[in-house]
Amino acid sequence: MLTLVFLSSGLFLGWSMGANDAANIFGTAVGSRMLRFATAAGISAVFIILGSTVGGGAADTLNKLGEVNVLAGAFGVTLGSALTVAIMTRYGLPVSSSQAIVGGIIGWNIYVGMPTEMGLVTKIASTWVLNPLLAMLFAFILYFIVKKSLNKLNLHLLKRDSVTRLGLVLIGSFGAYNLGANGIASVMGVFVSSNPFPGIDLGIIYLSPQNVLFGVGGIAIAVGVITYSKKVMMTVGSDIYSLSPVGALIVVMAVSLVLFIFSSRSLHDFLVSYNLPALPLVPISSSQASVGAVIGVAIAKKGRNINFKSLGKITIGWVGTPLGAIVITLFILLILNHLIGLDIGG
Amino acid sequence: MKLKAIFGQSKKLETKIENYFNHVMKSILIFQEGIHDYLDGNLDGIPVRAAEIAKIKGEASEMRREIEEFLYREMLIPDARGDVMELLESMGKIAESSSKILGNLAIEKPDLTGKLRSSFQKLTRLTVHSIDELKNAAISYFTNVAAVKSYTEKVYFYENEVDMVEVEIKNKVFTTLKIERLSHKMQIRYFAEKIAFLSDKAEQIADRLNIYVIKQSI
């Protein structure tokens, strides 16, 4: 029972991520009525749970940043991060749960007196900057590839519609998988060292304790998608109304690719084995990737209607979110440790 | 995922849309024949032609409703659905207007003989050309969006030619020809304007089509 209470903050963070971030994958498709919400939510739920359970490579980096070895400590870190997200959202400030969790872990390090490896912090922070820039670059390149392909194929308007719809489902599934694989690190990453779950042998496959922990987190994200993401998807869809369905497909492709790059252990190991530069596996903000991708498409269309204010807002989030999470997590840990008397690790 | 079903339904709809435009064009060709009949003095054929157009127009309207219902029911082309419906409806209205012109000709029987005969023949021929090019542009909007512009340019060309013939007819009626009664002059002008209006309508739809094409660019 106590385990569930401690996990609740992570599950809440997962629910919140599902409610908000699934819109970065299926928002434009649902908002523009290319896909029904039920279809998008169903696909998201299945692939997010799959991605969360099987993926989760980004969690290792968070554990290197700070190994929160006690369940109550992990609870404090995720609660601090979740509260940061809630408070900043309440005041309309740009926020990302992946950045909040990094701030939360640094807050735990400070509280328990563990050193924070600044090299790693710099590495993580650099991926935040790289994330929207990469999404922008991918979307820019994809725009020309897709445009050329469409011109060459010269599809009937209705056939193009069917192909785009199919693309949104397929790429959206890939995106949802990677959203789960990347985002689970923020949701359950800090619980890895104090994981309360045993492994499960399903006969055909064996789910390690980490697989089970991440699977539970994935279910929380999926519940967030099913119960609360419809409104967000409709808003995202109308916010980016100037994008055509094909433009939306390009954005989803770019976001999915960026999420894949930052969460696929196989790709990371493949690049390393060939002595190629590999990006660190870090939880990133799909919202910021989405903004980057939309701007990438806008630049490809000769820079019309670009809202550079959204990039400025992201920059504020890079600094504001971790700082806010450090302060709030310190405060939460103080309460848990001194007022309630819980061991928060260290 | 019912892939085969999705693409199969889309193929049926593609055919239906093309049939719709062909129906509209057929009614315009009958209109042209009706005008020729009238100018050749075959007045009895006019009501038959008007009835033929009305029948085709009825079939086209039924097709249009089926297309629109299908587009909405299957949530197809959400970004272009409104444009497609506007295009189909406005094309249908051209057919409807042509039927009314023939009907009014049969009732009012204006005197379009003599030097006016060739002018009205030319006016009708150019008007039909403009609508034919519009039909090509409309089909291209679905099948080959890059070709729309070349067809709409032809619509503009023929519409301009129609305008010139219309002015030529008005000059003949009010200046050159000796038509005694002002009411007769105004009646002839009315029919010239009504036929030319069909190409004006084609020009307006061509303008809209060019906008739809821009909206389709990714």
Image: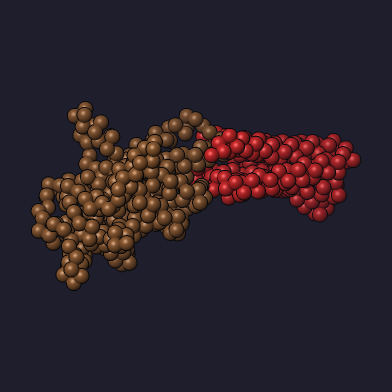
Horizontally, residue B200 falls left or right of residue A9, namely right
Query: How is the protein colored in the picture?
Result: by chain
Q: Quadrant of residue A82?
A: bottom left
Would residue B127 be seen by someone viewing this image from the given angle? no
Residue B113 horizontal/vertical position (percent): 83, 40
- Which residue is depicted at the point 37% across and 54% down? A220
- Which residue is depicted at the point 53% across and 39% down? B1
Chain in red colour: B
Horizontally, residue A254 falls left or right of residue A238, namely left
Chain in brown colour: A
Q: Nearer the viewer, residue A59 or A327?
A: A59
- Which residue is depicted at the point 46% across and 51% down? A41
Q: Nearer the viewer, residue A184 or B88?
A: A184
Residue B38 horizontal/vertical position (percent): 84, 39
Q: Nearer the viewer, residue A302 or A160?
A: A160
Horizontally, residue B147 falls left or right of residue B40, namely left
Furthest-bottom residue in view? A339
Question: Which quarter of the rendered picture does the C terminus of chain B lie within?
Answer: top left
- Which residue is depicted at the point 20% across and 67% down? A336
Residue B142 horizontal/vertical position (percent): 58, 38
Would residue B44 be seen by someone viewing this image from the given angle? yes
Residue A337 horizontal/vertical position (percent): 17, 66
Classify A149 as above or below A90. Answer: above
Furthest-right residue in view? B44
Horizontally, residue B164 falls left or right of residue B172, namely left
Q: Quadrant of residue A324?
A: bottom left
Furthest-top residue in view? A274
